[in-house]
Amino acid sequence: MPDPKTLSWKHSVPAALWLMAPFDLLASLAMDIYLPVVPAMTGILNTSPAIIQLTLSLYMAVLGLGQVVFGPVSDRIGRRPVLLGGALLFATASFLLAGTSDAAMFVGLRLLQAVGASAALVATFATVRDVYADRPESAVIYSLFSAMLAFVPALGPIAGALLAKQLGWRAIFTTLGILAAAALLNAVPRWHETRPSGGTHHRVAFRPIVRSTAFWTYTLGFSAAMGAFFVFFSTAPRVLIGQAGFSELGFSLAFATAALAMILTTRFAKRFVATWGLAGSLTRGMLLLLLGAALLTAGQLLAAPSFWTFVVPMWVIAAGIVFAASVTANGALQAFGAMAGTAVALYFCIQSLIVGVLGTLMVVLLDGDTAWPLVGYASVMALVTLTALRHLRQRQHTQEEPVSATRPDTP
């Protein structure tokens, strides 16, 4: 019998999307809209590029880590309080970011902004699971969420560049605060509690997940894909604006082409994934990352920084990101249907930690004004993933042999 709380959710799909989508989009927009002013923030806050890098790295790491925290919290106290509290924190931190000029305060507020985004994001997807898990509308909602998110990296930096040019960098964070406040005010009277009532709280079992070779292999592949894009948007402002002399708007348009390359590849990915399978798609994705890294290396060694030496190789990496990310969730989570929520939380958490830590180290240690951080991250993570994938295949082959040996010979 359906839970009475889920029955109280009477919104149509368009109305539900209008209610939920802003919280999904704002979590990503807070990264992308800020990119055009990243090079200028060292002078504005009178700090080092490494500290400014923390405003990107900490945001991503906390966004992932928070899912492990807020998922269980929303199971205990409900989706509505977690969502409203997260949205309020995000909006407040955004307004305060617009008003500070202190580097330490700025980093701390970015961390709080990420905490709020993580809470709202978890509550949003938990609500989708509560209400639509056994209904066909779930596929529509998830696909539309994915389609909308694909455009954020393309349009976010352009919006940030225009805001900064017309109104100054503080307008970027003021805009985020206004959008979050508007979404919050829309949610307060309409977002009803959907957490199933009367459920028991079981101890979270992480051991079966972390002992799974398939889980780690595909999570590493997801980390390689998402981390390559993270390192790209961490270094792109410094390479294109600082070294190649792009304007903020010019940078945003160039950056958007990499996002568009991902969108275009997505249109064909389903067909190729059906042909190649999970392992084949992940392998080809990692090989494209290595090819893109090789092209970046050639451009770094043989020419000055430019659109052709930095952005065009990223198109190749972008295609690899799509092929990998199209299969990594299924590959990592397919064995954990009974504990899917915990597996999903670990999947995103581990990915965020790898990307945040290793990606930041690459940017800091390999000169973020060059293509070397992207070359280093894409190469290392692609090779690690391919090695893990080879080990997984060997293990699966070994497990199949005893089964084959017990079959009677056919005449």
Image (cartoon, rainbow, N blue to C red):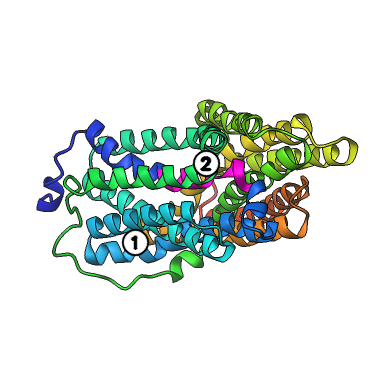
> Mark 2 packing: few (<14 Cα in 10 Å), some, or many (20+)?
many
**Which label is found at residue 33?**
2
Q: Nearer the viewer, residue 170 or 343?
A: 170
Give the answer, above or below, for where 94 lies relative to 207.
Answer: above
Magenta residues, start to end:
26-38
What amino acid is found at the position of numbered circle 1 in the picture? Gly
The residue drawn where x is 47% and y is 54% is: 99
Q: Nearer the viewer, residue 189 or 296?
A: 189
The verdict on residue 37 being magenta is: yes
Q: Nearer the viewer, residue 188 or 403?
A: 188
The answer for how far apart the CA atoms under marks 2 and 1 are is: 27 Å
- Upstream in sequence: badge 2 or badge 1: 2
> Mark 1 packing: few (<14 Cα in 10 Å), some, or many (20+)?
many
**Which label is found at residue 71?**
1
Q: Residue furthest bottom?
A: 203
Percent x, y of residue 272: 56, 30
Percent x, y of residue 134: 23, 43
Quadrant position of the C terminus in the picture = top right
